[in-house]
Image (cartoon, helix red, strand yellow):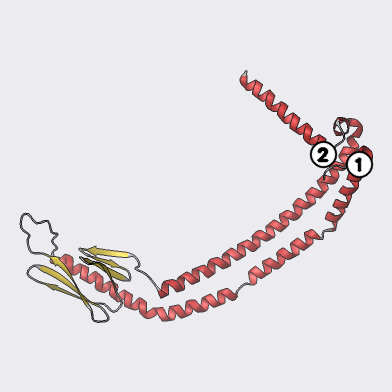
Amino acid sequence: MEDAVRIVVLLVVVGIIWGLRRMYLFPRGWAFAFSRQYADNREDLAQARWRVRELERQGERQVSSARSELAAHRARYDKKIDALEHRIAALRNPGTGERLARLGDVTLFEHLLTVEDEAGTHSIPLAGLAVRFDTGQRNHSIYLTRANGQLVRAKYPHHPPAADEHEQRFDEDQVRDFAVDIENAVARENSFRARIPQQLTQAQEDLARARKDTAAQDEASEHLSQVESRHRDDPRRKEAHVALENARERWKDLTGHFPPQ
């Protein structure tokens, strides 16, 4: 029962809104808005309105399509420029790269390694790094010699601890394998660094060409201008607006009230 009441109320509200809108579109009272006597007059005004709105919608769809086309070309252009700029930035500063391995206080990345000690964490570039493994009575050691000659020692205890010690212990093969991982990463990094100048030059040339390549954008922009101009100057649109104004004038002559567009 309550649902039925709600439906009735809703229909009444919709009917009231429809009626008020109709009286707004065809002003001067109930008879002019609803009576059959003035049906032809209402149809004359409604058709003139429909013609204007239909031509406006057609033109707006065409303009919107041209704008979307231009936006798509601009987005592709910006994406290409951004990709090349990021490529150049990555060549100039490749950062740490992917994490490859870790053993003890040393973490190996694609372009550098980090060593943790009491003073904090230190980064060591792989380019030009010399790696040497050594073993002693208490520790295995990996000696890392930077390109500038500075030496860093990473220690890996292997002597059996006392029963109350919790310090991690490393076997020789484990440390040797890690040293080999570092040497291989250094070889890859040296090769990567050797290729950077040529790759950077190529990327900069590609970027310069890409920035100049605006033909697709220019063509889409010109197409948009033509579509906007065609819509703005469309004689059918102008005729439809004149016809609507004439229909409104006829309604005013009939009722004394000027209807909305």
Q: Is residue 77 left or right of residue 177?
A: right
The answer to whether residue 80 is left or right of residue 57 is: left
Q: Residue at x 64, y 68 (%)?
A: 217
Relative to 135, does residue 62 appear above or below in the rendering?
above
For residue 225, which quarter of the picture? Answer: bottom right
Q: Say which quadrant the C terminus sits in.
A: top right
Q: Given the image, on which type of amino acid does mark 1 rest?
A: Lys
The residue carrying pointer 1 sits among few (fewer than 14), some (14 to 19) or many (20 or more) residues within 10 Å by Cα, namely: some
User: Residue 246 or 58: which is nearer the viewer?
Assistant: 246
Label 1 – label 2 distance at C-alpha: 12 Å
Three-letter code for the amino acid on which mark 2 is drawn: Leu
Per the image, the residue denoted by label 1 is: 252
Residue 104, image x, y percentages: 20, 63
**Total of numbered circles in the picture?**
2
Q: Position of residue 37 (x, y in %)?
A: 92, 31
Residue occupying the point 61% across, 65% down: 73
Most distant residue in the left direction: 162
Crowd tier of the residue under label 2, counting other residues whose Cα lies within 10 Å: few below 14, some 14–19, many 20 or above: some
Residue at 77 percent of width and 52 percent of height: 56
**Residue 58 drawn at (x, y percent):** 76, 53
Name of the residue lying farthest toward the top: 1
Determine the image quadrant of residue 237.
Answer: bottom right
Residue 25 tag number? 2
Above-or-below relation of 48 to 232: above
